[in-house]
Amino acid sequence: MQNKRKMKLGTQVGSGFAIVIIIGLLVAIFGRMHLVGLGNTTDRLAKHHLANLIVLQELKDNLNVTIKATLRMLIATEQKVLEDNQKLIEATSAKNTKLVTQLEENLRATEVRNILGELQQNRTEFATVGRQAVALSLSNRQAESIELVKTQLEPIQTRLFNNLNTMIQLQKDYTTQTATNAIEESYYDGNSLLVLAVIASLFGAGIAWLITRHIKKQLGGEPAYATQVTQEIAQGNLAMPVDLASGDNTSLLFAMNNMRKSLSSIVEQVRESSESIATGASQIAAG
C-alpha cells in the first residue's frame, strides 16, 4: 500500500494501460496459435486426405483402362490393335507407378499403407498373368487363355478393386473425420476467444475502476469538486465547508481543508491584531 501511495499518478495510469495492453496481446497470441493449428488441420485435409482420394480414384480408372486393354488384346487378331493396346497398357502402368509412389509419400494411416502394399502385389501378379494370357492367345491357344483369365486373372482383378475400394472408403472416413475435427476445433477456438475477450474486458474494467478509485481517494472526491474548492479558496471564500469522506486524513481535499482553516485562522489573527492596533491608536489619540 505504501509503495502504491508513493507511485506517481502518471506511473499508475501508465501501468494500468500497460497491463490492459499486455492482456490484449496475450489474447491475440492465443488466438493466433489456435488459428495456426486450425490452418494446419485444413492444410492436412487439402494436401493429404483430399489429394489421396483424387489419386486413388485416378488409379482405379487407370486399372479399368488396363483391364479393358488386356481383354481387347485377348480377342484381337490384327497386329495394329495388339500394338496400340500394348502401348496403352504400358503408358497406363507408368502412370499408375507414379500414382502409387505419390500415395506412398502422402499416406499416413498404417492400415491404408498395408492395403497399398497388397495392391502393389496384386498389380504385379495381374501384369504377369495378363502377359501370359495374351501370349497364349497369340499362339492360337484360345481355350487355355480363356481358362487362365477365368481361374487366375479375374480373381486378381477382384482383389485389385477390393483393395482400391477399401482404400477409398478408408480415405473418405479419414477425410470426414478430419473435416469434423476442424469444424469442432473452430467452434472451440471461437468460444475460447470469446471467453478470453470477456475476461480481458472485465479485467480491464476492473483495472480502470481501481485506478479511478485510487485517484479519487488521492483527491478526496471528484476532480470537479476539488477544482471548485480550489477556486473558492483562491477567491477568498474561506468559510466554504469542504466535504470529506469518513476517515480521510491523506487526500488533497483534506490538505486543502487544512489550508483553508490555517488561512482562516491567520486572517482572524490579522483582523484581531488590526482591531487591537486601531483601539490602541484611538486611546493614544484620546490622551
Image (tube, grey):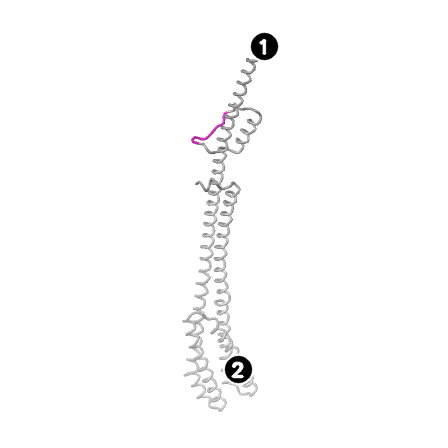
* Residue placed most toward the observer, 38 or 56: 38
The residue singled out by tag 2 in the image is 90
* Residue placed most toward the observer, 148 or 165: 165
Which of the numbered marks, if any, corresponds to residue 240?
A: none
The residue singled out by tag 1 in the image is 285
Specify the quadrant of the image occupied by residue 170.
bottom left
Classified by dominant secondary structure, the portion drawn in magenta counts as loop
Q: Residue furthest top?
A: 287
Residue at (49%, 36%) from the top-left corner?
A: 218
SS assignment at label 2 = helix
Residue at (51%, 47%) from the top-left corner?
A: 18
Classify mark 2: residues with Cα within 10 Å, few (<14), some (14-19) or many (20+): few
- Measure the C-alpha gap from mark 1 to mark 2: 143 Å
Residue type (three-letter) at the residue carrying disc 1: Ala
Specify the quadrant of the image occupied by residue 143.
bottom left
Residue at (44%, 71%) from the top-left corner?
A: 167
Q: Relative to 50, is 241 above or below?
A: above
The boundaries of the magenta stretch are 241-247
* Residue placed most toward the observer, 22 or 185: 22
